[in-house]
Structures are given as structure tokens and as C-alpha cells.
Amino acid sequence: MLRRFNTFFDRPSTIYLLIAGYVVAAVLQGIAFSAFIGFLRAFLGPDPSRAWGPMWVLIGFGAASFVVQAATLIRANRVSAYDVCGNAVARIGSRVVRLPLGWFDSGSVGRVSSAISTETDNLSHLAPVVLPQFISGIVTPLTVMVVTFCYEWRLGLIMALVVPVVVLLWNWASRLLMTEHQEAPAIAARTASATIEHAHLQPVLRAQGISGTAWPPLAKALDDENRGLDAIMTAQGRPAIAFGLLGQAFFAAVLAAGLGVVLGGGLDVAAFVAIGVMAARFTTPISQSVFYAAALQQDMVSLDTIEQIVQTPALPEPAHPRHPSGTGIVLDDVGFGYEADDTLFEHLSLRADEGRITALVGPSGCGKSTIVKLIARFWDVGSGSISVGGVDVRRIDSAELMGMVSMVFQDVYLFDTTIAENVRLSRPDASEAELAAAISRAGLDAVVAALPDGLDTRVGEGGLRLSGGERQRVSIARAFLKDSPILLLDEITSALDAENESAITQTLAELAAGRTVVVIAHRLSTIMNADQVYVLSGREHGGPTRIVEQGSPAELAAGDGMFAALVQDFWRTARWSVR
């Protein structure tokens, strides 16, 4: 466990230095108890003034133990805050951003949230809280036992006999608690996911008259968490009772045996009183051992939970990256599926040439958005290849590939900061003029002008203070500011009104100059401005998606295929009117 925990420290020796400090402090504390015997003998003897020397020895060992323990705790708290918490969150974050999107599902937010909060918090307590208590609970009683052997071997033997019993009880408690603690992270992750989703769904739930914890998924998650906590508390109860009874039995045995030795003349009263005090110090760790076991088991489970994330295989980086020459995109005989037994694409091939707008059209669920994400290498294809500038995307460094691509998705998430900072996210060093130009080209300037704080208006968590169309325009402005040679646009006009749709559509022609543009759209106005259209089909019939039509919008509209039917449906609905 310590070897795994040590990976969270900046210096490999840190954890061992902390352990050494705790051990030294515990030994000094045990020796201080032995000095207590000499002090009592002198203080209760015929000349109490002779107790000054032993008293200063007692104070010296006690003060030394306190100083060493305090210095070690200060260091432990510092490294726990900066090394453990900081490194754990950094490792989780750096791994998550490199994971394929297939890893993310309805529970991924909860798993990450639980890992960076609950599990990281558990680990942060290991060095400054759990280890000092655990080490003190072992080393100090052992030191007391050795000292007791020196004064009265029979009492020391009683202490020694307790050790194997404690070990057996410890192993039993550890196995019992591990089973319950292993369930805790999954329960916490489910609760976190349900709570986050519950917060996001507030407008929908309130519209349906659902308030509080009446939403079934949240109620079930909270109920599961309560049952899990009850199970952990129940599992701790039996070992706690056993350890408590053992501690009391041990203390009674030491007192009874010690009293017998004193009455027999084998031990003076002062030593007996001191040994009784030391036995009490021995008893407390025995009674509390179950809590140390629970804390250590919990920390081991937290390590497992964090490592499950940070050790998840990321998309592999090329050992010898190649640099694309150009921005043309080619999908060659691509096969792909989210699940091994569910093929989405089979033998899919298409081209998106540089300086041209390529539109993807097809029924919902046929994989149009997936194609865009495969181009950006959010996943790796199962077969075939996707190349940019003549180089397989798997041979291009991920940072270089993402630097070449600007993406706008149908679902827009904004950070809880200002509009300006949300737009600058794609290019933090952009000038004010470049920022203003991107905002204008995205049709966002009128929105900004109507806001009381203009570009400094905070958008709220997820951008909830803006409308759907306004959030999408912020995202479009972000892509325009990045000014990458490849634009991947997924339903960018779906939340815009006719006026802003027209403005964005006109801008696409300008953006396409010298760039590769792949656009997914259902609105005919966007599609008809494309240079070429690929029509996808097959998924809606239960088979893999294939390209069923390809050509310019005018050529396909003049035919009798799916695209022509789409155009005819558009014109029929365009003639509808409300009387």
C-alpha cells in the first residue's frame, strides 16, 4: 500500500521520512512512560526532593516526543495538501482528458467527481491522521511492553500474550471491512452522478411538479448510499466490541497480576502504579484498533478507485509522430462500433477536400456526429484508416491534431465565467480586435450589446444564463477565434433563428477559403451551400451505416434518391402557413 501511496508524493522518500518521524516520536513516548516509574519511585520514597532528576528526564522525553511528532505532522499536513491532493487531482485530470470518449458514460461524471473529492480526501488523511495514530498504536505499546519486561517479566509476558490475539482480530476485521468498503466508491459515484443530473434537470423536473428527492433515480441512489453506510457501520460494530472487550480484559489481567506481585513483595507500589498507567496506555490502542483497520481499508479502496481511472488505457501516442502536409481528410474503408458486437460503420469511405465544404446528411443515429469525432480522434477506428493531410491520425501527435481542428457541437457547455473568457478559451493570447472580430462573425455582437456587462457578463454554470442559441453562438465564436485550418461543425445552426442562421451560413463560405470544412446539418440552407454532400443510411434499418449517395447538392436534388426526397419535404413544409 505504501509503495502505491508513495507515487502521489513529489519526492519518493517523503512517506518513509514521515514514518520514521512517527516511529521516533512513538518510541520517545514509550520511553517517557518508563521514566515515569523512576519519577514515582523517587517522589513516593523517603526523600521526594530526589524526584527532580527523574522528573526532568520524564519531561525531556515527553517534550522530545511532542516536538518530533509536531514537526512530522506539520510536514505531513503540508505534503498532503500539496502533494497528495494536488497530484491526485492532476493525475486524474491529465488522464481523463486523454481517455477515449467511449470511456465516458452516464456514470463517468460521478466516478470522476467521487475520485477527486471523496477518495482524494480519504487519501489526504492517511499521512497526517491515520499513519500517526496507527504507528503510535503499535510502537508505543511495544515500547511499553519492553520496558515492563525490564521491571517485571510476568506483567510483560501478559502484555506479550495479547499481541497474537490482536493480530488475529485485526486480520478478521480487515477482511470483514474490506468487503463493505469496496462497495462504497461505486455507491458514492452513483450518488454523485444522480445528484449532478438532478441539478441539471431542475427546469424539467419542476415543470413536472417533481421536487426534493422525489425523482426516482436520486431517491434510489440516496437509499443505496444509506444502506451502504449502514452496512459499513454494522461491519465495524462487531470488531469494535471484540477489541473493546479484549482491551478491558487485558487491563484487568495486568492489574490483577500486578497486585498479586506487589502483595507477594516482588514489586514496589510506585512501579505497580506506573505499570498500571502504562497498561492503560496499552489498552487504548487495542480498543481503537478496529478504527485504524477501517481507515486503512478505506484508504486502500480509495487508492484502487483512483488507480482505476489513472490506469485506464489512453489513446496511444505515436512513438515517431508525422506531420501532415495539408488539411484534406480521407476516410478509407473505415469500420467502427461503440461495442464489440454492434457495428456502426462498415467499409465507409469518403473525402473532405481542402478549401471545400463537405456536408454529411442522414437520419438521426446514423453516425454523422461520430464521423466528426473520429476525425478529431476522440476514438480510434476498428478497421481502415482516417488520414489528415495524407497522414493517419494515429500517427499525428494529439496536440498537433487538435491544434489543427476547431469544433462546434450541437450540445454546448460553457464555463461559469465571462463571455470573453469563454470565447478566449480557444486562443488565450488573442488580441481585443481578434476577439471582437470572432464575436461579430458568430453573430454574437448584438447579444453582447444587450447585456448589462457586455463581454464581462458571467454566463452561469454550463451557460444557463444564456439561451440555447446564444450559447451556441459563443461556441461558434470560440471556433472562429481559434482560426484552425479544419472546421468540424455539428448542427451549428440548430438553435439559431432565421436571421442568425443566414449570417452564419454566409460566413461559412468565407471560412472555407483555404480550409477543410465538414458540416452536419438538417437545414437545407446550410446543406445547399456545401460543395459536396454525402448521404448516410443503413443504421435506421438495423444494419451498419454506409454512404448511399454522393455529389453536389444540385446533382443530388435533381435525382430521385434520399437527398431529393429531403429537398422535396423541405419545400413542402416551407409552404405551410398558420391561418
Image (tube, rainbow, N blue to C red):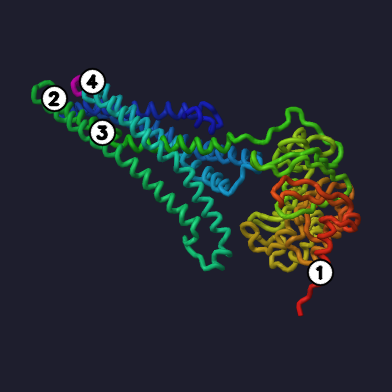
* Residue 348 relative to residue 136: left or right: right
Q: Amino acid at mark 4?
A: Phe
Q: Position of residue 322 (x, y in %)?
A: 80, 32
Query: Where, quadrant-wise, is the C terminus in this rendering?
Result: bottom right
Graded by Cα atoms within 10 Å as few (under 14), some (14 to 19) or many (20 or more), the crowding at tag 2 reads some
Q: Which residues are magenta?
A: 148-155
* Residue 572 relative to residue 97: left or right: right
Separation of disc 4 and disc 1 at Cα? 98 Å
**Residue 152 against residue 183 in the figure, above or below:** above
Graded by Cα atoms within 10 Å as few (under 14), some (14 to 19) or many (20 or more), the crowding at tag 3 reads many
Query: Residue beneath label 3, please?
Result: 283
Q: Secondary structure at mark 1?
A: helix
Q: Amino acid at mark 1?
A: Ala
Separation of disc 1 and disc 2 at Cα? 107 Å
Q: Residue at x 18, y 21 (%)?
A: 154
Query: Residue beneath label 4, please?
Result: 149
Q: Secondary structure at mark 4?
A: helix
